[in-house]
Amino acid sequence: MTQAELVVVANRLPVDRVIDADGEPTWRRSPGGLVTALEPVMRRADGAWVGWPGQSDIEVEPFEFEGTYLVPVTLSAEDVELYYEGMSNDTIWPLYHDVIAEPRYRRVWWDSYVKVNRRFAEAAAAAAAPGATVWVQDYQLQLVPKMLREARPDLIIGYFHHIPFPAYGLYSQLPWRRQMLEGLLGADVIGFQRVADAGNFARAVRRQLRYGTKATGITVPNGDGTTRNVLARAFPISIDSASYVELARRPEIRARAAEIRSDLGNPRKILLGVDRLDYTKGIRHRLKAYSELLEDGAISVEDVTLVQVASPSRERVEAYVQLRDEIELSVGRVNGDFDTMGHTAVRYLHQAFPREEMVALFLAADVMLVTALRDGMNLVAKEYVAARADNRGVLVLSEFAGAADELSSAVRINPHDIDGMKEAIMRAIEMPAAEQGRRMRALRRKVLENDVARWSESFLAALGSAGTANRAIRADA
Ligand code: GDG
């Protein structure tokens, strides 16, 4: 088996299994941001990527795909149900998003989570060359850093947490709170989206494990009298900004944006929401604010339309089934109350679209609504900004999204405050072009400068120095 100098470990492989024209299964690169982010780094390093192929019970040998060595981890249908849909998406996801939905704590889910994390750790250990760097991604794999360190003390191990890390008062609900922290602390560097997430993590470590935490790192005992220094800090993730600028320049995409406007009946203003259909995204709050504006007579459907793309997500988890019912009931009510023959209040699309269509939608939208109740970063906010090379359009952004730390020139809202959100939407609708331009230019500077390549480079640079320093401590002992 090939061993790599850089190994990424993520729940999903960067490819989807599809059936080609001859009816044969084949692999297609999946469109995710992480894939784009890591592609150049992986190519340069001849990297390996360990992950689940996305369908249960598929057993495939490791294979080469567009310059990356892919190492599939097999999950049975039961693993998917317990580890992925259960522990990851029905326990950790709601708990870490401030219990917007009620987390369920099931011991069989936890047992499966431990077992599957071990399988990922073993696959990563086998794929890593001596002294290699391993970068573990996200909340499904929080135990992997420690498991990997025990198996392979020679490795440099990084972990990035894509979702929020909750305040201690909430985190402490987790029946396995100590094991999870110890799992993460197997890494040399633990990256978070926001400074506040890193702070919440450090506090949990102090309260649960009594380790000393400083800005320069957390002192973690190795068990043999020596210690390691674990750096836990913010590395806000970003997007491949240049690719959005490029798409937004294409004549056919600009033409498509004009076509979308006219298909919607040329309303004066188009509001847009683009989210995975998830209860963290605040879609119901957004619909509430918008429908009250119609009810108040502040806007009319001829004047303002809301386009809501809600891409299908986690459809086998009960909370998501319920959320979809609630949203579709609200959309039906608003449309029933306010539609005319020629105009619709909410154009609701429970579909996934190609990236080109997304960019056309961004260009057609006068106001982008990002009203998340809690969100690690929210890449959609950054994508909208990157696409608006014309310096027009207004971003309305929840202060509960990680993106709010950097995108301070957006119109900020608290999505729980419906009146405040209504005011912000009206302000965005009425904002003069000069102010739109001023704000958009400031937003674009941030997103174009801090793109995803810079994110991965800065994480890997910090990991290189932290890992080397910890290695030196070990060599001295
Ligand atoms: C997690 C964290 C953090 C959505 N629908 C379609 C589509 N998308 C794309 C968006 C964007 C991505 O999916 C969603 O990213 P977000 O950041 O908005 O949200 P999560 O999926 O919850 O991601 C989040 C992120 O990880 C990265 O660390 O920012 O906080 O929750 O790129 O454009 N893309 C296409 N069609 C769709 O229908 N092509």
Image: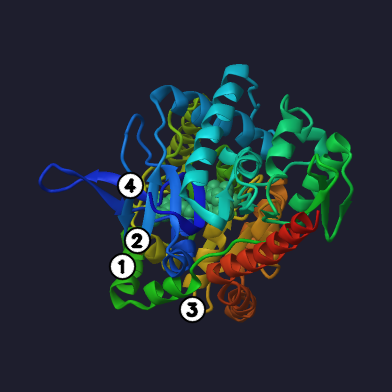
Q: Where is residue 11? Give x, y as percent.
A: 49, 42
Residue at coordinates 60% horizontally, 46% vertically from top-left? 152
Q: CA distance from mark 3 to mark 2?
A: 17 Å
To which residue does mark 3 refer?
Answer: 389
Residue at coordinates 44% horizontally, 35% vertically from top-left? 332
> Could you say which quadrant of the image residue 354 lies in?
bottom left
Specify the amino acid type for callout 1. Arg
Q: Considering only order in the chain, which callout, 2 or 1, is on the residue closer to the N terminus?
A: 1
Q: Where is residue 430? Give x, y as percent.
A: 60, 68
Side (left or right) of 417 relative to 113: right
Q: CA distance from mark 2 to mark 4?
A: 20 Å
* Mark 1 or 2: the one toward you: 2
Q: Are marks 1 and 2 in contact (CB under 8 Å)?
A: yes
Q: Considering only order in the chain, which callout, 1 or 4, is on the residue closer to the N terminus?
A: 4
Q: Considering only order in the chain, which callout, 4 or 3, is on the residue closer to the N terminus?
A: 4
Establish whether ligand 1 lies closer than 8 Å to the Cβ of label 2. yes
Side (left or right) of 181 relative to 292: right
Q: CA distance from mark 4 to mark 1?
A: 28 Å
**Residue 54 against residue 415 in the figure, above or below:** above
To which residue does mark 1 refer?
Answer: 256
Please tell me the numbered disc located at residue 16: 4
Q: Considering only order in the chain, which callout, 1 or 3, is on the residue closer to the N terminus?
A: 1
Q: Are marks 3 and 1 in contact (CB under 8 Å)?
A: no
Specify the amino acid type for callout 4. Asp
Q: Where is residue 346? Give x, y as percent.
A: 44, 47
Q: How many marks?
A: 4
> Could you say which quadrant of the image residue 377 lies in?
bottom right
**Residue 223 against residue 272 in the figure, above or below:** above
* Mark 3 or 1: the one toward you: 3
Residue at coordinates 55% horizontally, 43% vertically from top-left? 283
* Mark 2 or 4: the one toward you: 4
